[in-house]
Every structure is written in structure tokens, then in C-alpha cells.
Amino acid sequence: MGMAINQLPRIREECEVFHLSEKQCREIMSRLHNDLVKGLGKDSHANSIVKCWITYIQDLPNGKERGKFLALDLGGTNFRVLIINLGENHFDMQSKIYAIPNHIMTGTGIALFDHIAECLANFMKEHFVYEERLALGFTFSFPLKQLGLTKGILQRWTKGFSCSGVVGEDVVQGLKDAIARRGDLALSVMGILNDASGTLMSCAHKNPHCRIGIIIGTGSNACYVEKTENCELFDGEPGKPELLINTEWGAFGDDGTLDFVRTEFDRDVDVNSINPGKQIQEKMISGMYMGELVRLALVKYTRMGLLFGGRGSDLLYERGNFYTKYVSEIESDKPGDYTSCMEVLEELGLSHATEADMAGVRHVCECVSRRAAHLVSAGIATLLNKMAEPRVTVGIDGSVYRFHPHFHTLMCEKIAQLVRPGIQFDLMLSEDGSGRGAALVAAVACREREVQA
């Protein structure tokens, strides 16, 4: 064998397409800010891309919530049922994960809600509360147009779901109907929310400075506390100065505003997704797509002869085979150590990879994940600048933020660079926002009801 040419400089050059300059980040911020304002505006909302839905959550937890609450958490391939006991100084939580089989994810809405009600009943029996009347909070992490705390109309399915007969309908009613069809459960649904709102509620329960909730997991979304006077569509009870807004910023870019930073790989992922043309920002960030972006880049560089001596593998060339968890594993290796990288490449039938190849693969992973972190950071900085509060804690949940070794650090550095001087922020990992958050929404609703009574 002759001397192998080090292709890393060429790979680095190719990967420049993933780099976001500070100037580009600031342009993204200005475009997102305009889209947020459109979403909040009465006359511009209908045609807005970033919808900024009103959640009807106006009270954050204050630590005085008491009692036993159920929570449902539906937002991806699994869903959970939880029971939460709130006491003076304790917070007991038990939960169980149930799978959603593929035929239900893509079947009818009735079958989906019947499956959920069935699991709920089994869970209540297991926890000996089958006979009790309990308040329930429902985390439903898909784009909802809320008409009240317990009324939400599904706008579109995302993340691989396509159940028929649900889009345009009230999801709470769908759940209530399924519970009624069984006839054996006494539950009051006290609130519906998404995982971003749940994350904010859960973090605010521990930290009163928490005013933004972010999800960086299978999907990407943000919610934040807005002044009620800026929410032109709010038609709830007057008198409360603040309101939680669910931005649904995963749709940012659906009208082409992000095309100036998208790559051929982003276009490929989008065209081959279940929802082409939708959730463009989400597809550049979230765990559902990050691994695939890396795979597409690796395939291109292999075919150019820059990786693996130009010899790929059937597994590498097949869609969906490079999992996002691989990105986290490969980047967890110390500099100069390629143990995890080697394991991943062996799993993909690429055991002929050299150390130079592994350095190239790691570089691609770093570029894709860094871009995702910088895009999210530009979004968070936009919210912080818009809110203009001196000190804000950002609650964050989701597999990418939780498991990627550098995401937190990348975000702290980038937000600090992009945020206006004088604004202090910190990032807080949410402890199970979607479950605990749903119970807290139910608890706060019960607490407020008692205040009024």
C-alpha cells in the first residue's frame, strides 16, 4: 500500500457549509424576531409561519400546590402515564412507559385514544387509584391551537405520526371520548400543554427565574413568558399581566427564510421526510434528523474518495442507519481516542476505516451538532432580547441536550455572544418536564380554582 493521503483538510473544507458565522446568526435572529411578532399579531397571525400559540397558562407554580395528580405524556414513539403526589416538602412521582405500535401511530385517532385510555386504566389499577376521582394534566407535544386551558385543536402531526381524524379536532375531547367509551374512569382533564410548556412549569417549580422552556429532542420547540398586552389574540380573563406563549418555532423557515444557510443535506432530509416542506428549523436541529444529516454527508465524502478509501458499506448507504446517539457517542471520545467511533463504524460495516477516517467522521459529527447548537442558541438569544428581562433561567429538556457531551457548553458560549449586554441567563436541565409539568398544570389549575371559590 502506498502512503495514504490525509484527506482531513478536504473534509474540513467540505464541512464549511455547516458553519454559521456570527453575522448569519444575527440575520437568523432578526428573521425569527419578525416571525414571532407576526405570530403574536392579530392581523398577521393567520399567515404567520411561527404561530406563537396562546397556551392559556397564566400562573406558574409557587410551591403551594398540594395533592395527588395524574399526568399523560404523549409526544413521540412512547407515551407515559404518571402519578404525582405533591406535599409540603416532597414530590413523589411514579410513572410507566407504554409503547405506541407503528400501526397505531399511522392508524385512526380513535384507536390512538382508545389505546391511551386502556393504558391509563391499567396504570390506575396498578397504583390502586382506579376507583378515585383524580385531576389529570395532558402533555401533548404536537402543534396545537389552544382555545382554552382544556381545549386544543391539532394543527398538524409531526415526528412520524399521521393518525386520521385528529387534525382540526379538539384533542382533549378525543381523550375524554375514549375515557367515556370505557365508562370505568372518573377523571377531570384540567389542562393540556406541550412539552416545552411542561419544561418551563417543571423548572419554574424549582427556580422562580425560569421564564423560557426549550425542547431539543426528537423535535425542537420553545415557549416563553410574554406580556399579555403583546398577545393580540388573547381572549381569556383579563387582569393577569403575563401569558405563556408556545412558539412552535420548529416551523421557522417553512417559507424559505432559512434557505440561505441550508445545505444539500438539509434538502435531502426534508424531501424524504413524512412532512416535506414543514418543520424546516426542526429538521436542522432535532434528534430525529441529526444522525441522518451526518450520514448523508459521510456518503457524499465517501463517494468523493475522501473517506474509507472510497469504499462505503450497504448499511452506510441506507437511510436512517446512522442514529443520532452515534453522534453523541463519537463526540464523547477524548481527543486522539476513537474507541466509540470505531465501534460505530464496525456496526455499520466499515471496519476498514483508518484513524484518519475516524478523525474525518468525528469532524462531520462536530460540525452538524455545533450548527444545531448555534441555531438553538440564536433562537434563545432572540427570546431573551425580546423579553428584555435582566435575569432569566432557561429550562431545557430533550435527548439531544441531555446526552450530547458538548451541547450545553456550545450553547452557553453562543448565547452569551448573541444576547444584549446586561442580560444574565443560565441554562437548567429540566427534570422530566413533560410529565411533572403536566401534573403541575393540573395542580396550579386546582389551586387557582380554590382561590376563586
Image: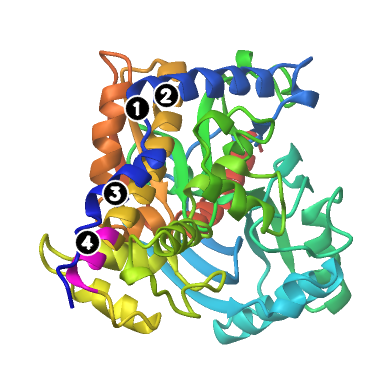
SS under mark 3: helix
Q: Can I make out residue 185 in this image?
A: no
Relative placement, left or right, of 372 versus 334 is right
Instruction: State which region is magenta.
Output: 354-360
Question: Closest to the observer: 209 or 385?
Answer: 385
Q: Which residue is mark 4?
A: 359
What is the spatial separation of the Cα atoms under label 2 and label 4, in whole angstroms?
27 Å
Residue 191 shows in this picture: yes
Q: Residues within 10 Å of mark 3 (few under 14, many from 20)?
A: few
Name the N-terminal-most of marks 4 and 3. 3
Mark 2, other Cα within 10 Å: few <14 / some 14–19 / many ≥20: some
Q: CA distance from mark 4 to mark 3?
A: 12 Å
Badge 4 element: helix
Left or right side of 429 for 64: right
Q: Residue at x 32, y 40 (%)?
A: 207
Frontmost of labels 2 and 4 is 4
Q: Which residue is mark 3?
A: 10
Image quadrant in which the N terminus is located: bottom left
When the figure is inspected, residue 334 is found, relative to residue 193, above or below; the finding is below
Q: Are marks 3 and 2 in contact (CB under 8 Å)?
A: no
Quick one: SS at disc 1? loop
Mark-to-mark CA distance, 2 and 1: 5 Å
Residue at 50% x, 17% y is 30
Residue 340 image point, x, y percent: 24, 74
Q: Earlier in the sequence, mark 1 or mark 4?
A: 1
Q: Is residue 30 magenta?
A: no
Nearer the observer: mark 3 or 1; the answer is: 3
Secondary structure beneath dot 2 equals: helix
As drawn, the label of residue 24 is 2
